[in-house]
Image (cartoon, rainbow, N blue to C red):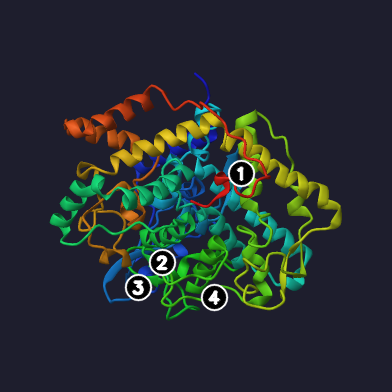
Amino acid sequence: ATRPSPIASRLYKMSEDEARDKAMPMPDFQTSISNGDYSYLSPATPAKGKSRAISAYALGTPAVRPRSARTASGKECSVWPMSKDVRDCNDTVHKDLSILPALQVILDSPPVQRLANLNQLGCASNTYPCCTHKRKEHSLGVMELAGRMATLLKQKQEQLEISEKDVLCLRIAGLCHDLGHGPFSHAYETFLKAAYKNEKEHPEQYEERNRKFKEEHGVDMPPIPEKYEHENTSLMMVDFALSAVGLEIDWENLDEPLKQIGSGIDRELFGVPLRSGEVEPLTSRDMIFVKECICASPLNEDHAPTPQTAYVGRGEMKEFLFDVVNNRHNGLDVDKIDYFIRDEQMAYGSIQSNFGIWLRCAFVTWAECPNPKKCFICKDKVEPVKHLMICYPDKLLPSAMMFYATRIKNHSNVYTHKKTVSAELHTVDLLLEADKHSCMLLNTQANDPFSFPVPSTFDSFKYQRLPISRAWMYPRLFLRMDDTIISIIENKVIENPLPRLDRLRRYLNDHRCHRFYKCVAEIEIGLEGAHDKLWEKP
């Protein structure tokens, strides 16, 4: 017989000891929780005969018990501390990733786990079969690069006073920046634009659906905005991720720990672990900073009590931090660095670009705004102002040109390849056809007592069912909007053998058989001829 591994032997010995005796004393839990004491979770050196608990802790399975607490509204709930272990995982691009305890809490929330069912490149897998990597992998990569860049800047320029909490917030922003992407990634945004135009030009196609909706809810169907931005939905899903662990941003107490709204993570113990063993909790201002990093602008009225005209999360002397994940000045940020490298590896089989130098050579200094027309600070000023921003040495000019050339190459060869576009247009038409029928309305779980997660401010939303084009309006429904939506539609078609669904059945059959549209012609548009109708705005 082969000799069991050390871990297997230890587990066997633990179970044998448990069967032989139960002499191991447990901590006085009632006393501990009444005093808010979690010291019994610390991996201290055990006394003789008490090694089992510490062995279990070493295996990552501490006996975490919740304590009783009260929400901001006075309701009793149970809260527990975040784990003290750092989780390590492998990545195909960045190799080793370290996931801190606070990041584990966000990573394990339903909105982030949903990204595992979203292809990073949408329909590009029809062109490049290996392009099946997920948004979750990309988000973990951006999280890692954001942490590395902030840490390098902290080490090189101590006068910037970058704190560990700043680094943690940037990593959370990198992890959550793509939460607002819908099924098939950018194809869902194309679908929403097409749905807005089609409902405006052909309202008769939606009469039956809208009539059913009004009979059920007593109000008209909520309209689709003319312009949809997935970043706004990402901000909504950040709130949803916090609510999943019983927390919420409190705009009235920005510098206090997050508001406790239900059972979940203890708001006092959700943050940055200190060397002393204590935890510096994340505040509402910190989570606002996370959201501002995602959208690269102050929060609008949908995500703040009143529209903000300046950053709230951090002051002017830390303005450069907002450009790490989403750089509003030049677009050179860790988000693009990760997906350029990751998409190249999956599409071409190897990494053809090395953008690690952008992390190593980044330097913070005062510089004139390069894009004043789009900068929320400079657009109303006569002359551009100087910002404390991330800059690079002149020697990287060829690398910068290569960076943007890589973007053009990937767009031409992968993102807008004619077969990719063909599959995307067919998918958009399928979703458009499904969106017209009342039988395709999806349950929002608005009044479901067993719905997950804990109640939050979104419970004021009263619609029981919504079409696919409005799923982004409600987080519990958007949670189920991923690349499996085609199967959901197909199941509903099977359950409703109605003649008016025949066209949708043909779309579904063509999608299953990969019978997408064919490119039949190309029109070359020249720069000459100002009266060319092709250049006129529709």
Which residue was labeled with disc 1?
339
Which residue was labeled with disc 4?
312
Spatial CA span between label 2 and label 1: 34 Å
Question: Which circle, 3 or 2, is nearer the viewer?
Answer: 2
Q: Quadrant of residue 73?
A: bottom left
Question: Which circle, 2 or 4, is nearer the viewer?
Answer: 4
Q: Residues within 10 Å of mark 3 (few under 14, many from 20)?
A: few
Question: Which of disc 1 and disc 2 is earlier in sequence?
Answer: 2
Which residue was labeled with disc 3?
34
Amino acid type for the residue under numbered disc 1: Tyr
Label 3 element class: helix
The reply to whether dot 1 and dot 3 touch (C-beta < 8 Å) is no
Answer with left or right where residue 179 lies relative to residue 244: right
How far across and how far down the image is residue 349, in percent?
65, 28
Answer with left or right where residue 139 lies relative to residue 223: right
Label 1 element class: helix
Residue ID at (28%, 59%): 222
Q: Residues within 10 Å of mark 2 (few under 14, many from 20)?
A: many
Residue ID at (59%, 69%): 276
Spatial CA span between label 1 and label 3: 48 Å
The foreground one among 486 and 517 is: 517
The foreground one among 458 and 509 is: 509
Question: Which circle, 2 or 1, is nearer the viewer?
Answer: 1
Question: Which circle, 1 or 3, is nearer the viewer?
Answer: 1
Determine the residue located farthest toward the bottom in the rendered image. 252
Amino acid type for the residue under numbered disc 4: Val
Q: Which numbered dot is residue 266?
A: 2
How far across and how far down the image is residue 261, in percent?
33, 69
Answer with left or right where residue 349 lies relative to residue 264: right
